[in-house]
Image (spheres, grey):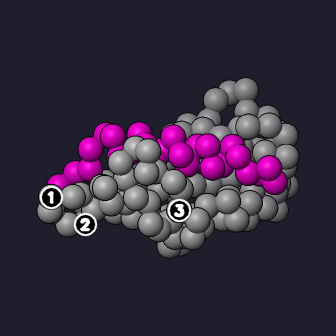
Amino acid sequence: MVASIDVFSAFETKLDARLIGSTALVTFLEGQFVYNHVAYPEAPGSGYVIYQNQTQVATQVQAKGNYSLLYYIKGVVAGPENIERAAYINTLIRQAVNEQPVDMTADGYLNFRIREEGGQKYPDNFGYWHHGGLYRVLIEEQ
Protein backbone atom coordinates (compact mmCIF):
# COMPACT_ATOMS: atom_id res chain seq x y z
CA MET A 1 0.00 0.00 0.00
CA VAL A 2 1.37 3.40 -0.96
CA ALA A 3 1.14 6.21 1.59
CA SER A 4 -1.24 9.06 0.89
CA ILE A 5 0.00 12.44 -0.27
CA ASP A 6 -1.25 13.88 3.03
CA VAL A 7 1.35 12.04 5.11
CA PHE A 8 4.18 13.23 2.85
CA SER A 9 2.95 16.79 2.80
CA ALA A 10 2.51 16.85 6.58
CA PHE A 11 5.94 15.34 7.25
CA GLU A 12 7.79 17.47 4.70
CA THR A 13 6.27 20.67 6.11
CA LYS A 14 7.54 19.68 9.57
CA LEU A 15 10.93 18.53 8.26
CA ASP A 16 11.41 21.80 6.40
CA ALA A 17 10.54 23.75 9.56
CA ARG A 18 12.92 21.59 11.62
CA LEU A 19 15.84 22.19 9.26
CA ILE A 20 15.16 25.92 8.87
CA GLY A 21 14.66 26.12 12.63
CA SER A 22 18.16 24.81 13.30
CA THR A 23 20.06 27.94 14.31
CA ALA A 24 23.43 26.23 13.83
CA LEU A 25 22.53 25.04 10.33
CA VAL A 26 21.03 28.34 9.14
CA THR A 27 23.98 30.29 10.56
CA PHE A 28 26.49 28.03 8.84
CA LEU A 29 24.60 28.22 5.53
CA GLU A 30 24.29 32.00 5.93
CA GLY A 31 20.54 31.77 5.36
CA GLN A 32 17.57 29.43 5.07
CA PHE A 33 18.83 27.48 2.06
CA VAL A 34 16.79 24.28 2.45
CA TYR A 35 15.09 22.78 -0.59
CA ASN A 36 12.80 19.85 -1.29
CA HIS A 37 13.99 17.80 -4.32
CA VAL A 38 16.24 20.32 -6.10
CA ALA A 39 18.29 23.39 -5.26
CA TYR A 40 17.56 26.70 -6.86
CA PRO A 41 20.17 28.66 -8.83
CA GLU A 42 20.39 31.41 -6.21
CA ALA A 43 21.76 28.98 -3.61
CA PRO A 44 24.97 30.53 -2.25
CA GLY A 45 28.52 29.27 -2.25
CA SER A 46 28.21 28.62 1.48
CA GLY A 47 26.13 25.54 0.63
CA TYR A 48 22.58 24.33 0.95
CA VAL A 49 20.46 21.39 2.07
CA ILE A 50 18.33 19.18 -0.17
CA TYR A 51 15.90 16.56 1.09
CA GLN A 52 14.18 14.02 -1.14
CA ASN A 53 11.66 11.27 -0.55
CA GLN A 54 13.16 7.97 -1.69
CA THR A 55 10.24 5.57 -1.15
CA GLN A 56 6.73 5.37 0.24
CA VAL A 57 5.60 2.10 1.74
CA ALA A 58 2.90 1.32 4.31
CA THR A 59 4.47 -1.14 6.74
CA GLN A 60 1.11 -2.57 7.86
CA VAL A 61 -2.35 -2.61 6.39
CA GLN A 62 -4.90 -1.95 9.12
CA ALA A 63 -7.50 0.62 10.10
CA LYS A 64 -4.73 3.04 11.08
CA GLY A 65 -1.94 3.39 8.55
CA ASN A 66 1.64 2.85 9.61
CA TYR A 67 4.06 4.41 7.18
CA SER A 68 7.74 3.73 6.70
CA LEU A 69 9.27 6.50 4.60
CA LEU A 70 12.85 6.94 3.47
CA TYR A 71 14.37 10.37 2.92
CA TYR A 72 17.77 11.37 1.62
CA ILE A 73 18.88 14.58 3.33
CA LYS A 74 22.19 16.07 2.21
CA GLY A 75 24.43 19.08 2.26
CA VAL A 76 25.70 20.37 -1.09
CA VAL A 77 28.63 22.72 -1.64
CA ALA A 78 30.35 23.94 -4.81
CA GLY A 79 34.03 23.23 -5.35
CA PRO A 80 36.19 20.17 -4.69
CA GLU A 81 38.02 22.05 -1.94
CA ASN A 82 34.81 22.18 0.10
CA ILE A 83 34.32 18.51 0.96
CA GLU A 84 34.86 19.33 4.66
CA ARG A 85 32.20 22.03 4.46
CA ALA A 86 29.70 19.56 2.96
CA ALA A 87 30.59 17.05 5.70
CA TYR A 88 29.97 19.68 8.39
CA ILE A 89 26.57 20.56 6.87
CA ASN A 90 25.74 16.85 7.10
CA THR A 91 26.78 16.86 10.78
CA LEU A 92 24.43 19.79 11.42
CA ILE A 93 21.62 18.00 9.58
CA ARG A 94 22.20 14.91 11.73
CA GLN A 95 22.08 17.01 14.92
CA ALA A 96 18.79 18.61 13.83
CA VAL A 97 17.02 15.47 12.62
CA ASN A 98 18.47 12.13 13.75
CA GLU A 99 16.42 10.44 16.51
CA GLN A 100 14.34 13.62 16.94
CA PRO A 101 10.77 13.02 15.72
CA VAL A 102 8.67 16.02 14.70
CA ASP A 103 5.29 16.91 16.20
CA MET A 104 2.62 15.93 13.68
CA THR A 105 -0.35 15.55 16.04
CA ALA A 106 -2.16 18.55 14.55
CA ASP A 107 -2.03 16.74 11.19
CA GLY A 108 -3.46 13.52 12.63
CA TYR A 109 -0.17 11.60 12.66
CA LEU A 110 2.40 10.42 15.18
CA ASN A 111 6.01 10.55 13.97
CA PHE A 112 7.76 8.23 16.38
CA ARG A 113 11.10 7.71 14.70
CA ILE A 114 13.57 9.44 12.40
CA ARG A 115 16.80 7.47 12.24
CA GLU A 116 19.81 7.69 9.98
CA GLU A 117 20.34 4.37 8.25
CA GLY A 118 23.36 5.16 6.12
CA GLY A 119 25.20 7.90 4.37
CA GLN A 120 27.16 8.77 1.32
CA LYS A 121 29.41 11.47 -0.04
CA TYR A 122 30.36 12.07 -3.63
CA PRO A 123 31.30 14.75 -6.16
CA ASP A 124 29.01 15.30 -9.13
CA ASN A 125 30.00 16.18 -12.69
CA PHE A 126 29.27 19.87 -12.12
CA GLY A 127 31.83 20.52 -9.37
CA TYR A 128 29.54 20.09 -6.32
CA TRP A 129 30.16 17.90 -3.28
CA HIS A 130 27.18 16.04 -1.85
CA HIS A 131 27.31 14.65 1.69
CA GLY A 132 24.25 13.25 3.42
CA GLY A 133 22.32 10.41 4.90
CA LEU A 134 19.32 8.18 4.35
CA TYR A 135 16.76 8.59 7.13
CA ARG A 136 14.04 6.08 8.00
CA VAL A 137 10.88 7.90 9.06
CA LEU A 138 8.15 5.97 10.90
CA ILE A 139 4.70 7.55 11.07
CA GLU A 140 1.39 6.28 12.39
CA GLU A 141 -2.06 7.70 11.72
CA GLN A 142 -3.87 8.78 14.89
Q: In terms of sequence position, does the residue under pointer 3 or pointer 1 come before the other?
A: 1
Instruction: List x then y, in percent, for residue 126.
Output: 67, 41
**Residue drawn at the location 21% of the way across and 58% of the way down:** 64
Q: Residues within 10 Å of mark 1 (few under 14, many from 20)?
A: few
**Residue drawn at the location 68% of the way across and 27% of the way down:** 41
Instruction: Mark 3 and mark 1 in contact? Answer it, CB < 8 Å.
Output: no
Q: In terms of sequence position, does the residue under pointer 2 or pointer 3 come before the other?
A: 2
- The residue pinned by badge 2 equals 59
The quarter of the picture where the C terminus appears is bottom left
Q: Across the whole image, how many numbered discs are drawn on residues?
A: 3
Instruction: Mark 2 and mark 3 in contact? Answer it, CB < 8 Å.
Output: no
- Kind of residue sitting beneath label 2: Thr
Magenta residues span 1-25
Instruction: List x then y, in percent, for residue 140.
Output: 33, 60
Image quadrant in which you'd find residue 54: bottom left
Q: Is residue 56 magenta?
A: no
Image quadrant in which you'd find residue 92: bottom right
